[in-house]
Amino acid sequence: MSANAAQIRFWGVRGSTPTVDQATWRYGGNTPCLELTTPGGTRFILDCGTGLRMLGNQLAGCNSIASIIPGSNGTLTKSPAGANEAPIHAHIFVTHYHWDHIQGIPFFAPLYSPQNSFHFYSFRSQFLGRDSLKQVFETQMAYPYFPVNVSAMSADREFTEIAGGETFQIDDAKISIFWLNHPQGCLGFRFETSAGIIAYATDNEPGDAKLDRNLAQLASGADIFINDAQYTPEQLAGPRRGWGHSSWLAGTQTAREAGARNLVLFHHDPDSTDREVDDLLRQARQHYENVWAAAEGMAMSLGGAQVDVHLPTTRTGQRRDGNLRAMVTGFTSDGRAFQEETVIRDLTVQGAMLYLSHSPRLQSELQVEMGDPGKETPAEHPLKLRGYVVKLEPGPQTEQTAVGVVFTE
């Protein structure tokens, strides 16, 4: 990331409850957590779902908080790995208090090291009253819900109550707060930096005129607009109405009307498989050009007119240097259909690197028909696979693109 850029990284993208099954591993099963780094280096964390655990391990330079051992009196007997590393400071914005947005807090390793400091922000709940966020923080670690209480956390913690309609400055970021339409309340956050505007609107349902205007204002002119897309339009119009979530269709309509440059579909339903999310993305791209589906490990770098998207590397397994003839069919980044014959020389159990004269779009689907090694003509019964584009980079030859593909079936 360049010195003049901002970056948003996705650590948890799933809604309602975590998932741990093969059908959801490509987009990821952790609940919401995003990391935003401004051009000036200020770190913001958006929501504290189970994705917060992985972010914490990365920040602390450790694999887990396994070295935090609760004693019989609920105190620590050992410090976590990475306790002697450079201090970590971040501003943590919590959209609301539903379980999937706070359940990572007890597993956030940096909270257990005294040199670190964190400033938490969220609203005063009508059900909890004053110090709502602090109450939520402490209660979920109280007996019998967790083996150690909040006193085990030695990092410095500060709590600030915020509400919709506020705008304030933190270092090089101007932050605006908006109420969204969700049961028991939810906040949306807009970050304006010298590199551009990031709008975060998880857990919102269209249909309330006042709150719909809030959403439009939140997304207005955003370079990156992250929006709830948990349900299909059919689900939203039927049995899931009133549950506080949105759809890809509502997101594309808001993005278009608000003039957002990039829309990110977020808060995937726990029952939506990777293939189903692929389908939602494909439909959304038919209505709005720059649409992405949030995936764990995905990063978006923003610097002026340029938004670069980087998808996570895949679980590749053992590599094989081959010479497999393949026919690849797909669409270029500008929507043109293509078919091209190539040779695969870098193959794994779950994916491949293809070298193409065409440049497909990230998060688009390719059809790959592979033949036999060393044969000059394709096999009589080729292996037919579907691939998902996760990486694009310059190829070994001029006018060639190296395309990283994960096989989806």
Image (cartoon, grey):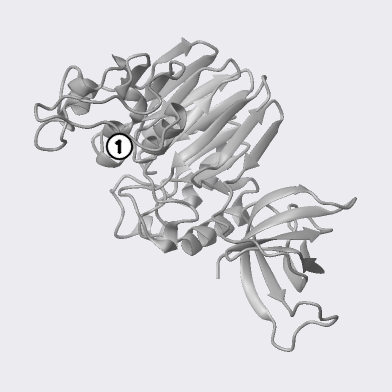
Q: In this view, which residue lies farthest toward the bottom?
A: 380
Q: In this view, which residue lies farthest toward the front?
A: 78
Left or right of residue 76, residue 332 in this image: right
x%, y% of residue 189? 44, 27
Instruction: Please tell me in which quadrant of the rendered image residue 367 appears.
Output: bottom right
Instruction: Please tell me in which quadrant of the rendered image residue 12 appears.
Output: top left
x%, y% of residue 122? 31, 23
Q: In this view, which residue lies farthest toward the right?
A: 398
x%, y% of residue 114? 32, 15
Left or right of residue 55, residue 100 in this image: left
Q: Nearer the viewer, residue 295 or 288?
A: 295
Quadrant for the N terminus, please. Answer: top right
Residue type at tag 1: Ala
x%, y% of residue 359? 77, 54
- Res 339 seen here: no
Tell me the residue that label 1 is attached to: 66
Q: Nearer the viewer, residue 197 or 313?
A: 313
- Res 184 seen here: yes
Crowding at dot 1, Cα within 10 Å, few <14 / some 14-19 / many 20+, comes out as: few
At horizontal 50% and vertical 52% (from top left) the residue drawn is 249
Query: How many numbered discs, if any?
Result: 1
Quadrant for the C terminus, please. Answer: bottom right
At horizontal 30% and vertical 39% (from top left) the residue drawn is 182
Mark 1: which secondary structure? loop
The answer to whether residue 300 is above or below residue 25 is above
